[in-house]
Image (cartoon, helix red, strand yellow):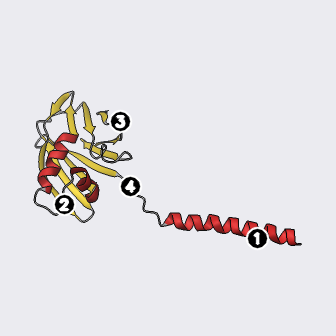
Amino acid sequence: MIVNLLFKMKNYFYVSGILTLFVLMSFMNVDFFSSMTKVDYIEGSKTLKFTTKMNTNHISDAIKINPNTAAFEAEVKKYVNNNFDVYVNGSPKTITFTGSQVSGETVWVYFETGGVSDINTLKIKNTILLSAFPKQINLVNIAYKGNQRTMNFQRGKEVNEVSF
């Protein structure tokens, strides 16, 4: 009887320990590192418009500037120009930064490239936040003449290409 009681107590402590571990793990702060870019082709102006959504703290840490300062937008512009390249049909395109907006935990970055008449292939190099955060994932969704494509970027896969 005592052996049976000790066995039950041992099981009780074992189950209690596992449940306590799960409860404690639920309070852990898990950070998710990602950016999302939407690419729209504007046929009338023959322009690709890019809208990128990033976490404010992550981009602020990467460029080492407080998002509430006047220099933040200029540094974001420089950062995007250094970490995002576009090639249409094999030819490199110059991206033009058109603005950014900080909205709480999110930074929206706007840029574009012009002179795009037809796209057979679109190649993008996207290293945004990859050097700062090893588990960073960057998604790019492209809308071109009724077609949708998605690209995924992470460390080791910084360049991606789609065909239309």
In this view of the protein, which residue sits in the foreground, 22 or 100?
22
The answer to whether mark 4 and mark 1 are in CB contact below 8 A is no
Q: Nearer the viewer, mark 4 or mark 1?
A: 1
Q: Compare marks 4 and 3 and give the one earlier in the sequence.
A: 4
Q: CA distance from mark 2 to mark 4?
A: 19 Å
- Taking the spot 22% from the left edge, 40% from the top edge, the residue there is 84
Q: Amino acid at mark 3?
A: Lys
Observer-side mark, 3 or 1, equals 1
Q: Which percent across, then down, holds residue 137? A: 35, 46
Residue 146 visible in image: no
- How far apart are the two marked residues, 4 and 3, measured between alpha carbons? 18 Å
Q: Nearer the viewer, mark 2 or mark 1?
A: 1
Name the residue carrying label 4: 32
Q: Return the residue at label 3.
A: 157
- The amino acid type of the residue labelled 4 equals Phe
Three-letter amino acid code of the residue under disc 2: Pro
Foreground disc of the pair 2, 4: 2
- Which quarter of the image is occupied by the C terminus? top left
Residue 46 lies, in percent from the top left, at 13, 40
Left or right of residue 68, residue 61 in this image: right
At x 23% / y 58%, what residue is drawn? 107
Give the residue type at disc 1.
Met
Q: Are marks 2 and 1 in contact (CB under 8 Å)?
A: no
Query: Mark 2 sits on what residue?
Result: 67
- SS label for mark 4: loop
Residue at the location (36% across, 39% down)?
Answer: 155
Quadrant showing the N terminus: bottom right
